[in-house]
Each structure stands twice: as structure tokens, then as C-alpha cells.
Image (tube, grey):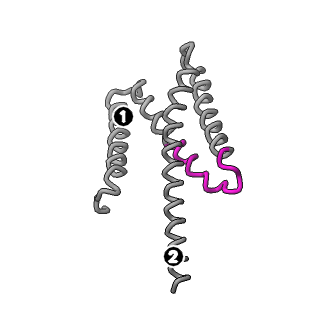
Amino acid sequence: MKPIHKKNFFPDVCEVFTILTLSKIVLESVFQGEFGAYQTNIAVMFLLSLLATFVLSLHERFRSVPLPLVILVQYLFLIGIVLGMVWLSSFWEPLHEHAYRDMFLSFTIPYVIGAILYYVSFFVKVRNANKYLMEIKQHKKDS
């Protein structure tokens, strides 16, 4: 196991929390004999988090496409999946009259916050890397 330090402390906590939470809902469903609404909600949140993180990570593959278009397509793809899941669930259970709106808001608000944090941190890292490259080039030029 890797040593824990200040740079990986929070990601490590998140990994442990995720493993414990997923283990808890699986064990509860096994011992209770049903996969209830609580377990379903946590499983769906995990799957949507996994999917959203994966889709955000794909932006590097579309460098030739303008970033605002990539961000828009990423969001439309994900919200389409979310609303498609709501539609599919309507075949098994009746939906609340505001189900689509509620799911839209429940996904959009955290996604936008997460995407902003992701892209801001990405551009900060790129700017810092460019700064270091310029320093290296300047150092080589001076040598």
C-alpha cells in the first residue's frame, strides 16, 4: 500500500468511503433480501459519478474541437443518459409528476459544480506546466 501524505489524503479517504458505502449497500441487500430505494439511490449516484468522471476525462481526446463545444456535448450526453434512465424506470414504477425536473436538477447542479472545479484545476495545472517549460527554455537559452 502506498504511504499516506497530505497530497493523497483526501483521495484516499474518498476511496475508502466509496468502498465501505458500496460494501454496506450490498451487504444490506443480501441480509435484508431486497435492494431497496436507499440502496438504489446510492448505487445510481455512484454509477452517475463514475460515468460523469469518465466523460469529463475524455476532453483530452478532443483537442481539435473547441472546448465550449466539448463541454456542451459532454453535458448533453450525460443528461441524456440520466433522463433516459428516468424514462426507463417508468416501465417498472410510476413516476412522480416532477420526476424529470427533479432528476434534471439533481444531476445538473452537482455536475456543473464538479465540471467547473475540474476544468479550473486542469487549466491551473496546464498554466503551471507552461510556466515551468518557459523557465526551462529560458535556462537552456541562458546556458
Q: Which badge, 1 or 2, comes first in the chain's sequence?
A: 1
Q: Nearer the viewer, residue 90 or 79?
A: 79
Q: Residue 140 location in percent, x, y? A: 53, 82
Residue 115 disc label: none
Residue 65 in the image, given as x and y percentages of width and height: 71, 52
> In the current view of this chain or complex, which residue is farthest to the bottom?
143
Q: Secondary structure at mark 1?
A: helix
The type of residue carrying mark 2 is: Ile
Locate residue 14 relative to residue 139 in the image: left or right: left
Q: How far apart, in angstroms, are the residues tagged by discs 1 and 2?
A: 51 Å
Counting other residues with Cα less than 10 Å from the Cα at mark 2, is it few (<14), some (14-19), or many (20 or more)? few
Say which residue label 2 marks: 136
Label 1 sits on residue: 25
Query: Which residue is at a point 50% across and 73% down the rendered structure image?
Result: 135
Magenta segment: 50-68
124 or 86: nearer the viewer: 124
